[in-house]
Amino acid sequence: MKLLEERIRKDGIVKPGNVLKVDSFLNHQMDIELFSEMGKEFKRLYEGCPINKILTIEASGIGIACIAAQYFHVPVVFAKKTQSINLDGDVYSTKIQSFTHRRIYDVIVSKKFLSPEDHVLIIDDFLANGCALEGLIDIVKSSGATIEGVGIAIEKGFQKGGDLIRGKGIRVESLAIVDGMNAETGEVFFREQ
Amino acid sequence: MKLLEERIRKDGIVKPGNVLKVDSFLNHQMDIELFSEMGKEFKRLYEGCPINKILTIEASGIGIACIAAQYFHVPVVFAKKTQSINLDGDVYSTKIQSFTHRRIYDVIVSKKFLSPEDHVLIIDDFLANGCALEGLIDIVKSSGATIEGVGIAIEKGFQKGGDLIRGKGIRVESLAIVDGMNAETGEVFFREQ
């Protein structure tokens, strides 16, 4: 998606260690008009698929998922990273390793909100090593629901997550795939799509 | 807001200890069409205020804030609950006690995204004891930005948060104010607005 690639080139900051900071428009401050265009693009890509629910994970997937949901006319469910005493015990759960936060999270979704009748689009902001996405896929499979596909804002194409998930036969659409970065020049190299 | 009150009556679940579960449409599964109507109502209430930014806190405030932001045509910033190694050190921070999770969070906002020129609307899903909101107000004040007001989906009017924040001279608009609940009958009593 050209608009997103241009925005990453303009406002993304490349840091040593293949870190791409997009916190000015994607995952701390959020540009809602950009999110609208991203939502329309997810809808175009998944046109005709019988999606009736969007699943994401807190926190930075929620904004993108909610704006996209307007074009699909479906509710959003977000997976929660810690057990809350306000949640019923009746949950699907999995464990997700976060490299960013250097810890393992318990991730849960109430059984009330995913069932075998559901056709799910999973949306998240980043796909890198694929740990978060594998956890969400695990939860959907536990529920018996169908995974229609995955929508990602930015995929780090040089990490293994994309290949890993596509290798399971799951459709993954990433709006921008970064194949490399140069922390000295600040350049970001995108895969042709 | 009648639409939200009706939805709480229909789908909210009253639990002992003054717990109101609204996870089927507000803070786990999210009804985006309801959020649109709530966003329009926040816009109507704050019409004419020079709001240029919406501030919320992860996780359940984000969806409501993002959908509302479409009617204000402004970006959303969400306060983060733990220090991430991907965030610059240059942050506003405060501590927030969560009764739901029985712990104290460090909450941060990057200094890049709040400045004295900003006129901020704070949005969150719940107002009960006011701890989260006080933390967000603390962060906005640290930045020198102006607080135009607060928009809340559901206020528990029988807890002290609403009075506490309004007592500071800050405008608080809650779309539904719950004055009482009966866990035996499941009834929810709303304040006339």
Image: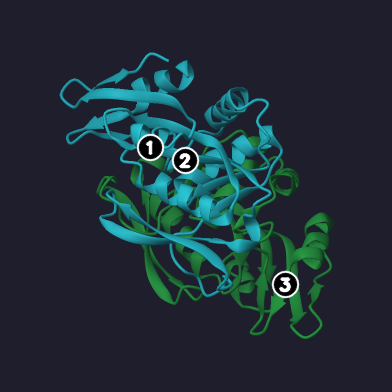
Chain colours: A cyan, B green
**In the rendering, at what x and y percent does residue A31 appear?**
50, 33
At x 41%, y 32%, the residue is A166
Dots 2, 1 in contact, CB < 8 A: yes
In the rendered image, the residue lying farthest to the top is A192
Q: How many marks?
A: 3
Could you say which disc has been placed on residue A44 in the image? none
- Above or below: residue B47 compared with residue B172: above
Instruction: Kindly identify which residue carries mark 2.
Output: A124
Cα separation, mark 3 vs mark 1, equals: 36 Å
Cα separation, mark 3 vs mark 2, equals: 29 Å
Q: Would residue A125 appear left or right of B74 to someone viewing this image?
A: left
Q: Quadrant of the C terminus of chain B?
A: bottom right
Instruction: Kindly identify which residue carries mark 3.
Output: B13
Callout 2: 10 Å neighbours few (<14), some, many (20+)?
A: many
Instruction: Kindly identify which residue carries mark 1.
Output: A127
**In the rendering, at what x and y percent does residue B74 appear?**
57, 36
Dots 3, 1 in contact, CB < 8 A: no
At x 47%, y 69%, the residue is A83
